[in-house]
Image (cartoon, coloured by chain):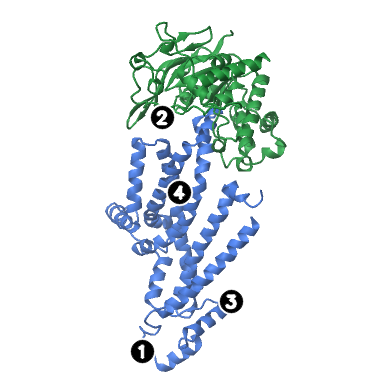
Amino acid sequence: MKDPILEVNNLRVSFRTYNGKVQAVRGIDFKLFEGETLAIVGESGSGKSVTTKAILGILPKNSIIEEGEILYKGDDLTKYKEKDFYKIRGKEISLIFQDPLSALNPIMKIGKQITEALVLREHMTKEQAKKRAIELMEMVGIPRPEERFEQYPFQFSGGMRQRIVIAIALASNARIMICDEPTTALDVTIQAKILDEIKEIKRKQKLSVIFITHDLGVVANMADRICVMYAGKIVEVGTAREIFYSPAHPYTWALLSSMPDLETKERLFSIPGTPPNMIFPPKGDAFAERNQYAMQVDFEEEPPFFKLSDTHYAATWLLHPNAPKVEMPEALQHRIARMNRKEGV
Amino acid sequence: MFRYIIDRVIALFITLFIIVSIAFCVVRLMPGSVYDQDGDLSQTVIDTLNEKYHFDEPIIKQYGYFLKNVFLHGDWGTSMKMRPNVPVFEVMKDRIPVTLQINLISLFAAIPIGLAAGIVAAIKKNTIIDHFVSFMVVIFISVPSFVFATCLQYFVGYKAGAFPIIYDASATGMAALHSMFLPILALMFSPIARVARYLRAELAETMNSEFMLLAKTKGLTYAQSTIRHGLRNSMVPLANIIIPMFANVLGGSLVVENIFSVPGMGGMMVDSINASDHMLTVAILVFYSMISLITVLIVDISYGIIDPRVRMGGKK
């Protein structure tokens, strides 16, 4: 494997609120390798967005990075001041937002929003910046870019706006692109197009991508590796193949069982209960409450990571040698068998 | 956009016509007549005046004459009491510049201060600076301008002797500015507070928006993103309160003008009502209405200039 370009070690982020300290991210580790797409999957409130915001230093004011480090090119980003981030934002690491409808300034021309950073930071002339912007707009698939350059966001559809946001993210040749649920606010047909667009751009520009989503279906075609997050922790990490074909954590099972595919005939699984209150995170495994396979030890002690392969780790006591043998849900077994059969053909 | 402006202007004239009609009737319906305070006028004089100005005819007929004069000759009538036999706009002509001067200077001085206070409060939200600004805002808004006027007159004018207690109409140049200082200052408090309060709320909200985050992540500095994205976007709704302020300060100056003996429009309006100088009262009302209506028109048009969504609304 190549060298990691970005490394997150034991990151803990909390938010001060009136009710107490919300522990949004509780000690996560991951590495992003050069040129790969790493997907971080988890439900709302699992801490995936907070992690990316910490990387770019755009956490809200009431947040605290309790401990841990984010290493980029040997620098620890958690130690960065606002003016240090100015050097890496957009230029080294850029971000694509969840909601393209509110991410663009409604009263500034599209062209200006793309060229702004180029003119202000890269000190390009207006003409150079415009040329670059039009190239970018062509690249992300916007027809008649010269004309579109002079228009305002309200004259664009949602999918078009997301393309503009991607163009802005690409403007300064960033090496890492973080996509924070880039297709959640779009309808399904546009979703597929934007995902293809991102894949294509990633290949052409040789980017490393962190892809945040709650939808495993979206990452199936995109990701090289997947981290599954629950309640501020990574519960399972592996290559996309490992996560889809041999998931080991009950939470990953639950996520996969609740995702429909074309041949699903059974009633879709829904995970019972709600995520835990992160002001008082539970002792032991945070998923134990909602886990039908939970054992006594799950409520008492946090499971460590068990190694399944060089790339595949899962944090569940079920993998402990002394644990009873538990099979994944039947519906999931059938699906995996189906997927394997298809591949065999 | 052109069509839109034409629509607004036509609406403005219809509104103005309705205001003039109501003002004319209401003023005439007030008890008392032009001759009340002049007990020694002979019947012959009264008859002659009645014949010339039609005071003895029904209101509706008088209204007809009034409209005829306004539309055919642009004649809004003559003052009967304040300055007898002088056309009303002639009477107002001397007063308008004084009022406009004081109000415009106070407003133009107040807006930058208000903007600065609002920006500082929004950026330093929930700090001691913000609390201080908010505290001052509450005081400036809740204490009426005539209280400030009297306090300024007493402490700054009388005790400290720094500025004249009353306005000196004969002064020119710097001396005039010097003598206008206290009324101007007294009129500034409320606009400062209102602009500051509004901008603080708007800017604080804009600063939390997604596009501010995007501006940051594309690599703008804090100052760049605040000025280029935060401020301009907060200005859109701000136009809506700043422009009508011109109309409001004109009304507010009514009392303040009296306190500082400024020979402006405010005093004249009260005097003309007391003297039953009907034509003059109507003319002053028209003047005030006209200013309010024009400010509303400017607000509507300025929205189109500041906000492209309104400007381009018509042509997709």
Quick check: do tags 3 and 4 share a chain? yes
Q: Nearer the viewer, residue A305 or B156?
A: A305
Q: Are marks 4 and 2 in contact (CB under 8 Å)?
A: no
Residue A26: percent from left, percent from top: 40, 19
Mark 4 residue type:
Ile
Same chain for the residues under marks 4 and 1 in the image: yes
Colour assignment, chain A: green
The furthest residue to the bottom: B44
According to the image, label 1 marks what residue?
A: B40
Residue at 51%, 85% in the rendered image: B61
- Chain letter for the residue marked with disc 1 in the picture: B
Q: Position of residue B159 (x, y in %)?
A: 27, 53
Q: Few, some or many C-alpha atoms within 10 Å of disc 2 (few <14, some 14-19, many ≥20)?
A: few
Which of the numbered marks, if any, corresponds to residue B111? 4
Q: Do the numbered discs 2 and 3 sit on residues whose CB atoms are within 8 Å?
A: no
Residue position for label 3: B71
